[in-house]
Image: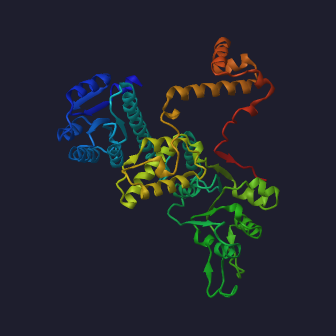
């Protein structure tokens, strides 16, 4: 961290000469530029492009000076919206500090000067700036990915995208499994877009959103006079997708009476309209999705096993957002920019507490919940930055562990030790070999992480998180 910080640029705007010198001494390990608070500050921002600006706003009892400082802060953020500004005020100027944060300051600090506390505040701003830069770099890397509209840099998402790229050129029927809100339709569209059918129709239908009595006519169409109200011949969704791809979302909700007809479509590649007697040949690719456990539905007789084997020639699992390490913040930043433009809001970024909250939250509603929270926050936020409160989330704390590389390494090390012991069933020599270390080193690791080896001899690998399932799972013919 120290080596990285030395290359970081800090601009200090302070009218008090003695205080400027003291601040310069406190941050002597940084690339520091000091100046009075004046129009010259804008020139300095353009010239040195600071990562963080420590800005003394003055005293609230001098309203003219305070107003000028706030205006200068606004101009700096307009010029360099990614710069992190720390607003420094007198202890009794809380409202001034709040106004600065509302305009877009990343944090504030109340005098009198405490070198230790101020140093923590400034370095925390640098850490947030570094995190944002890293996420934007990773986001730019995803721009080269073939799956347009899908944002993600986690290992699970990269594996998923590779699977989609492999399956897309084939005519295999694909079953997408995943929790609600994970974006299964996006991957269905990617399968279509990367296939040889991309110039034809992509037709989507949600089997759970249409009443059972209407779903059959929606899928298969009907002839004139087939039932009351059938005033003319109407092709169904299956015919509309001829030559292209049909996406059957929530296939687990399809009523049993229709499952037999869908099985015939898959077997014969023909469709008969309701009231019709002539089979209509079809050339289409079928992609299905569900958040239900189809094995359980088969066990209870609510889903046909022969249909399951037909729709799952290839099964692709879409991971929940909580398992996509690093993607929640990346998605939040992307959605924030998109929503700000859509609603014409001058929202510039996420406050530090919002970043911490997004990373710590489990996102039970997945990407859909994240999108809804960002949309609501952009609409309702009063300041230029979105806070944890705007998102309806709780700030987990001032020093998030996800920013601490030492903690992350220790956790990974402890997990590796536990997994090796589980695989070796408590045999220390075998576990040491798996880890590539000596037995004395393994003893040190056990003591360091307070891990008891004996429990792994009694309790095999079930005590350890299982390895993730393969993203791409071929299903054998029945």
Most extreme residue toward the top is 440
Residue at image coords 74%, 69%: 258
Q: Is residue 145 visible?
A: no
Percent coordinates x, y for residue 249 in the rendering: 63, 62
Quarter of the image holding residue 369? bottom right
Residue at image coords 39%, 32%: 121
Residue at image coords 74%, 66%: 259
Using the image, determine if residue 433 lies above or below residue 172. Answer: above
Please name whichever residue, 374 or 160, is drawn nearer the observer in this view of the structure. 374
In the figure, is residue 61 to the left or right of 389? left
Quarter of the image holding residue 352? top left
Quarter of the image holding residue 290? bottom right
Q: Is residue 117 visible?
A: yes
In the figure, is residue 409 to the left or right of 343? right
Percent coordinates x, y for residue 398 in the rendering: 48, 35
How many numbered tags mark residues here? 0
Using the image, determine if residue 314 lies above or below residue 231. Answer: above
Please name whichever residue, 302 or 449, is drawn nearer the observer in this view of the structure. 449
Q: In which quadrant is the N terminus drawn? A: top left
In the figure, is residue 332 to the left or right of 478? left
Percent coordinates x, y for residue 247 in the rendering: 61, 62
Residue at image coords 73%, 17%: 428
Percent coordinates x, y for residue 475 in the rendering: 72, 49
């Amino acid at each position: 961290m120290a080596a990285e910080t030395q290359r970081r640029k800090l601009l200090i705007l302070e009218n008090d000469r003695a205080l400027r010198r003291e601040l310069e001494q406190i941050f002597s390990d940084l690339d520091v530029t000091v100046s009075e608070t004046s129009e010259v500050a804008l020139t300095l921002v353009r010239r040195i492009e600071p990562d963080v600006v420590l800005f003394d706003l003055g005293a609230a009892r001098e309203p003219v000076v305070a107003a000028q400082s706030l205006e200068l802060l606004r101009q700096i953020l307009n010029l360099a919206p990614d710069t992190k500004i720390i607003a420094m005020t007198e202890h009794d100027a809380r409202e001034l500090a709040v106004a600065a944060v509302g305009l877009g300051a990343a944090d504030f600090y109340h005098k009198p000067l405490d070198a230790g506390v101020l140093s923590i505040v400034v370095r925390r701003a640098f850490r947030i700036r570094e995190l944002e830069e890293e996420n934007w770099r990773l986001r730019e890397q995803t721009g080269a990915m073939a799956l347009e509209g899908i944002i993600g840099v986690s290992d699970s998402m990269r594996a998923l995208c590779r699977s989609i790229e492999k399956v897309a050129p084939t005519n295999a029927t694909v079953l997408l499994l995943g929790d609600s809100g994970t974006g299964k339709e996006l991957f269905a569209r990617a399968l279509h877009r990367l296939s040889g059918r991309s110039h034809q129709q992509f037709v989507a239908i949600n089997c759970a959103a249409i009443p059972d009595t209407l779903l059959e006519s929606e899928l298969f169409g009907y002839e004139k006079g087939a039932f009351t109200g059938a005033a003319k011949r109407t092709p169904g969704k299956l015919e509309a997708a001829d030559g292209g791809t049909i996406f059957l979302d929530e296939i687990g909700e399809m009523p049993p009476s229709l499952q037999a007809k869908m099985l015939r479509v898959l077997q014969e590649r023909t469709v008969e309209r309701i009231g019709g007697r002539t089979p209509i040949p079809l050339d289409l690719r079928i992609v299905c999705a569900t958040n239900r456990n189809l094995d359980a539905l088969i066990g209870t007789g609510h889903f046909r096993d022969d249909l399951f084997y037909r729709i799952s020639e290839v099964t692709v699992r879409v991971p929940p957002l909580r398992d996509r390490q690093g993607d929640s913040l990346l998605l939040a930043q992307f959605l924030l920019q998109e929503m700000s433009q859509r609603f014409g809001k001058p929202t510039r970024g996420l406050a530090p507490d919002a970043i911490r909250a997004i990373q710590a939250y489990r996102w039970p509603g997945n990407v859909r919940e994240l999108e809804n929270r960002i949309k609501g926050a952009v609409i309702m936020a009063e300041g230029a930055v979105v806070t944890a409160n705007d998102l309806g989330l709780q700030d987990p704390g001032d020093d998030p562990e996800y920013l601490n590389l030492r903690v992350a390494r220790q956790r990974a090390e402890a997990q590796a030790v536990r997994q090796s012991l589980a695989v070796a069933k408590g045999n220390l020599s075998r576990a040491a070999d798996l880890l590539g270390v000596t037995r004395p080193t393994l003893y040190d690791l056990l003591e360091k992480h307070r891990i008891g080896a004996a429990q792994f001899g009694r309790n095999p690998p079930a005590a350890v998180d299982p390895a993730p399932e393969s993203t791409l799972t071929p299903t054998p013919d029945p």
